[in-house]
Each structure stands twice: as C-alpha cells, then as structure tokens.
Image (spheres, rainbow, N blue to C red):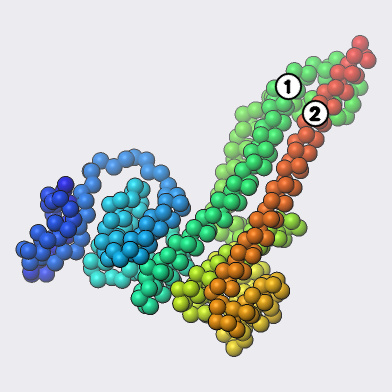
C-alpha cells in the first residue's frame, strides 16, 4: 500500500513524498530511522475524484465520534484513534477532516485546536466539552458526553421529522389533487358557461377558475417555482428563520410543544456540561446559545446575570419564570445535594416526555384539520359543478 508522508529533515526543511509499506506505523518507523521528524502519514488517495459528493449527514458525524469515543475509552492513544478514524470512515468530508486533525496533532496542536480547524459542523458545546476533557485529563469521558448529547439532538430532530412526515404528505397530496381537479376535470365542463345563462355564483367561480388554470398552466408552474425560490432564499437568512421560530412559539398548541422541546435541549446540554466538570457560568452561557426561541433566550440570559450577581441558579430561574415549579424544585434539590448534573438530566427527561406528549397532540390536530380543509375544497368544487349541471339541465 502506498502512503503520502510529510517530514522535517535534519536541516529543518519540510519534505514530502510517497512510500510503499504495510501500514502507517511501518512508514513512521522507516522515516524515523533516517533521522526525520514525521509530521503526517496518510494513505495515498486516487487522483481521480468523483464529480458529485453527497452531503455529510448528521448521523454519520455522530457515528464517527461515537467510534472515536469508544476507541479512547478502550485505551487507544488519541493519535492512533484519529488515524484509524481517518482510514475507516466512508464519507470523504470525514476522512479529510480526520486526516487534518491527525496532521495538526503531529505538529503539536491540542485536540481542541485541531478539531476547530477541521471545519466539521459541530455544535459549540462539543468544543467546550473537549476543552474541559483536556484540562481535566478526562478526554474520553468528556467526548462520550458530547456524543451522548449529539445523539440526543439527533433523536429529537428525527422524532420531529417523523411526526410531521404524514401530515406533510397529506397536505401536499391534497393540494396536488385540488390543482389536478382544476386543471383536468373542471375544464371539461367549461361549455356550461355558454349553455347556461344564469349560473350560480359558486358554479361560475369554479368553472372560470378551472378554465384559467387550464389556460395558464405554465404560468402557474412558473409562479409556484418562483415562490419556492423566494422562500428558499428567505429561509437562508438567519433573521427570517428566527422570526419564524418566534412566531411558532407564540402559537396556542404548537408553541407549548416547541417551548418544551427547547427547554429539554437546554437542560440536556447543562447536564452534559456539568458532568464534564465545566464551570457553572460557562455551562449556562453555552447552553443558552443553543436556545432557539428569543423570549426564552432572554429569560435565560437574565438568569445568567442574576447568577453572576450571586443568586442561586434555582432562584434566578424562578425569578425569570424560565421553568415550571417542578423544574425549580429539581434544580434546588440538585444545588443542595451537589447533584446538579443528575437533576438537570432528570429535568431534560421530564421536558422531553412532556414534549413527546404535546407532539402527539399537535400531530393528532393537524391530520383532521388537513382532511377537513382538503375535503372542503374538493366538496366546494363538486358542489359548483353539480349546480352548473343542474342549471344547464333546467335551462334545456
């Protein structure tokens, strides 16, 4: 097998090249015997690169770091674990990132610095947990906390997407059916506009709409495509996404579900931070960054200010009305017993359970509403057609 290497020779110059060997360790031994300082060894990649590269999925990122944490917990050295991940991962982005981390570690950078330079799409709390693990000498445990939190975020996102798949398909198919009826079925009855002199208002509206849809199909398709492009462009803006999130949080039923999901994530990050022995203030600041609802973020920022001023965390949260009475009691018990990380985990579990129940209610509410709206639209069209036919027969 051929490997690319980068070394520093006796005169301090950086030298690169290729070498045939059975493993990277053999390359390092061979180069070290010649008096070189090995900076990087990586398996030689084919020169032809694919023209298309699929996007890195979050689950692949979680799996890669889960394997890395397992290797470190098993006693494998960090450099060897990074090298193994670079060779064993299947996505090119991950392979490139781990190869870069390995090079940076050989140059003397810390794992935190190498991880930041890799460009992987990781949340801020991962870097904080890695930093805490390096400072305390508990990197495997801290990395495991980060992986558990990544898995939690992934599970919540998957649950939400899975719950909304059926309502989304139902609404999309209903809209498609209504458009199909307007474009294909209704124009077949367009002759009734000339045959009947005094059509009912509903019948005339349905028939003329169907004729317009049939005559302007491509214009309608262009309008829909333009609207989709505009919406996609707007959603790329962080301010627009934030307004949508805040608007959803103010809705009667969906808002409570969204708020409890956000609070559960905050409590889960707090638990991971405190379990990794991160300072309370740092944990509060970092966990607040992940809160998506502006109103709740303002509450937590106010609580952070109160804690910084000397208040207890439970009192500060209660002053800002950031949690429920049960949440305040859990935090208070954690402060008094010194088990705040465990109480935060219990709080996250509590809010996650409440969020799951509210999610089921929201889904149960969306389905009948979608059916009623789609059925009402189709019923209106059918009634208009029947009235037009009846009117035409009466005239005849």
Graded by Cα atoms within 10 Å as few (under 14), some (14 to 19) or many (20 or more), the crowding at tag 2 reads: many
Examine the image and state in which quarter residue 190 appears. top right
- Residue 92's disc number: none
Residue nearer the viewer, 210 or 335: 335
Residue pictured at 42% horizontal, 47% vertical: 55
* Residue 136 in the image: above or below residue 140: below
Q: Which residue is mark 1?
A: 185
Give the CA separation, mark 1 to mark 2.
10 Å
Residue pictured at 59% horizontal, 48% vertical: 161
Is 52 left, or right, of 107 in this rendering? right
Residue pictured at 21% horizontal, 51% vertical: 43
Is 94 left, or right, of 149 in this rendering? left
Is 395 left, or right, of 222 in this rendering? right
Q: In the displayed image of the protein, which residue is found farthest to the left? A: 34
- x, y percent for residue 344: 58, 72
* Residue 69 in the image: above or below residue 232: below
Secondary structure at numbered mark 1: helix
* Residue 297 in the image: above or below residue 3: below
Is 20 left, or right, of 114 in this rendering? left
Q: In the displayed image of the protein, which residue is found farthest to the bottom? A: 310
Q: Which residue is mark 2?
A: 381
- x, y percent for residue 160: 60, 51
Residue nearer the viewer, 143 or 197: 143
Asked whether the viewer can see residue 291, the reply is no
Residue pictured at 12% horizontal, 61% vertical: 29
- x, y percent for residue 393: 90, 14
Quarter containing the C terminus: top right
- x, y percent for residue 163: 63, 47
Examine the image and state in which quarter residue 170 appears. top right
Asked whether the viewer can see residue 9, the reply is yes
Residues marked 1 and 2 touching at CB (< 8 Å): yes
């Amino acid at each position: 097998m051929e490997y690319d290497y980068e070394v520093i020779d006796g005169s301090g110059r950086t030298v690169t090249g290729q070498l045939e060997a059975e493993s990277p360790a053999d390359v390092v031994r061979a180069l070290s015997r010649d008096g070189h300082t090995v900076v990087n060894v990586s398996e030689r990649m084919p020169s032809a690169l694919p023209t298309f590269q699929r996007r890195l999925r979050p689950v692949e990122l979680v799996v890669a770091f889960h394997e890395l944490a397992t290797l470190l917990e098993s006693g494998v050295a960090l450099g060897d674990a990074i090298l193994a991940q670079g060779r064993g991962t299947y996505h090119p982005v991950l392979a490139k990132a781990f190869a870069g981390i390995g090079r940076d570690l050989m140059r003397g950078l810390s794992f935190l610095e190498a991880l930041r330079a890799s460009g992987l799409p990781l949340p801020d709390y991962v870097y904080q947990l890695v930093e805490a693990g390096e400072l305390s000498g508990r990197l495997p445990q801290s990395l495991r906390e980060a992986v558990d939190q990544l898995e939690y975020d992934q599970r919540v996102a998957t649950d939400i997407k899975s719950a909304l798949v059926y309502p989304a398909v139902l609404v999309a198919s209903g809209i498609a059916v209504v458009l199909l009826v307007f474009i294909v079925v209704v124009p077949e009855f367009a002759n009734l506009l000339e045959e009947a002199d005094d059509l009912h208002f509903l019948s005339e509206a349905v028939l003329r709409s169907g004729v317009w849809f049939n005559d302007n199909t491509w214009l309608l398709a262009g309008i829909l495509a333009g609207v989709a492009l505009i919406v996609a462009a707007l959603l790329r803006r962080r301010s627009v996404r934030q307004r949508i999130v805040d608007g959803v949080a103010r809705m009667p039923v969906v808002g409570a579900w969204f708020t409890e999901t956000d609070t559960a994530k905050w409590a889960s990050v707090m638990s991971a931070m405190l379990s990794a022995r991160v300072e309370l203030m740092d944990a509060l600041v970092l966990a607040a960054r992940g809160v998506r609802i502006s109103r709740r973020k303002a509450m937590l920022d106010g609580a952070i200010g109160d804690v910084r001023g000397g208040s207890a965390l439970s009192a500060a949260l209660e002053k800002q009305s950031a949690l429920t009475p049960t949440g305040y009691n859990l935090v208070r018990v954690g402060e008094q017993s010194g088990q705040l990380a465990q109480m935060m985990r219990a709080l996250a579990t509590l809010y996650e359970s409440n969020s799951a129940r509210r999610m089921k209610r929201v889904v149960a509410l969306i389905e009948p509403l979608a059916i009623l709206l789609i059925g009402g639209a189709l019923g209106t069209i059918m009634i208009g057609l029947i009235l037009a036919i009846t009117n035409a027969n009466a005239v005849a």
